[in-house]
Amino acid sequence: MLSSWFPNVASRLPEFFDSFVQTLIMVGVSGAVSFVLSVAIGVGLVVTRRGGIKRNGFLFNLLDKLIDLFRSIPFIILAAALVPVTRLMMGTAIGPRGAVFPLVVGITPFFSRQIESALSSVDPGLVEAAESMGMTGWQIIRHVYLREGIPSIIRVSTITIISLIGETATVGIVGGGGLGDFAIRLGYQRYMYDVTWATIIVLVVLIAVIELFGRLLAEVVEH
């Protein structure tokens, strides 16, 4: 069946599998790095804003404007512009290794906004109660914001991972590797349309699995 419906994929099955693994690696590595950065930035935005437990107008405006700046740049343009910096930092600007840095830079602003939104949903009464008990700023962040915000953080992380998968496909245009690169080189440039459809099917299934896992995990944690 595979040879009949997807002949060009069947003849290049090891390469297709390697491309899928590359996509998973890019999503995993860049997602993990971005998660750490985004949690730090999201917490910074929540605690330094007006009415926050560590109000700091300068730091809040700095983070806020930097996020808006990077979010306003289309990812494909950003990835191309970062090629010299990527080559300097990663040693290469092609392949999964060269894709990680632009993916982190591209997804972190979006992820930070999502984390900020998740933490902002925490009941302000819990924060006030923690302050009245004499808890320090770090204790409030750890035991109130982060702990109470876990279900929302899982939901926004699921959304971000799905967006990140889309960006891994886009970065294939500039030689980032993965399924995006595989589909562009063969499906688009060589008119092997079965490669394009096979890539679409795999990505749709992958996203569906991630959405299901994220929803179930959020429900378990919430209850």
Image: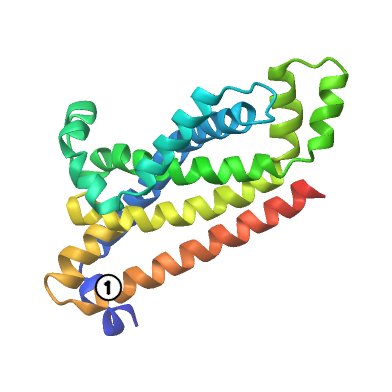
> Which quarter of the rendered picture does the N terminus lie within?
bottom left
Question: Residue 93 is drawn in which quadrant?
Answer: top left
Residue most toward the left?
190
Q: Give the residue at x 30% y 49%.
A: 73
Q: Position of residue 214 (x, y in %)?
A: 62, 54
Q: Position of residue 206 (x, y in %)?
A: 47, 62
**Residue 190 horizontal side relative to residue 214, left or right:** left
Q: Give the residue at x 11% y 72%.
A: 190
Dot 1 corresponds to which residue? 196
Residue 156 drawn above or below residue 144? below
Q: Is 93 in front, or is 126?
A: 126
Question: Residue 122 is drawn in which quadrant?
Answer: top right
The mark total stands at: 1
**Label 1 crowding class (10 Å Cα cut-off): few <14, some 14-19, many 20+?**
many
**Chosen colour scheme:** rainbow
**Residue 39 horizontal side relative to residue 174, left or right:** right
**Residue 206 horizontal side relative to residue 74, left or right:** right
Q: Position of residue 168 (x, y in %)?
A: 33, 53
Residue 64 drawn above or below residue 27? above
Q: Is 64 in front, or is 176?
A: 64
Q: Give the residue at x 60% y 30%.
A: 43
Question: Which type of secondary structure does the marked residue at label 1 adopt?
Answer: helix
Q: Position of residue 188 (x, y in %)?
A: 17, 71
Residue 182 drawn above or below residue 145? below
Question: Residue 66 is drawn in which quadrant?
Answer: top left
Q: Give the residue at x 40% y 50%.
A: 24
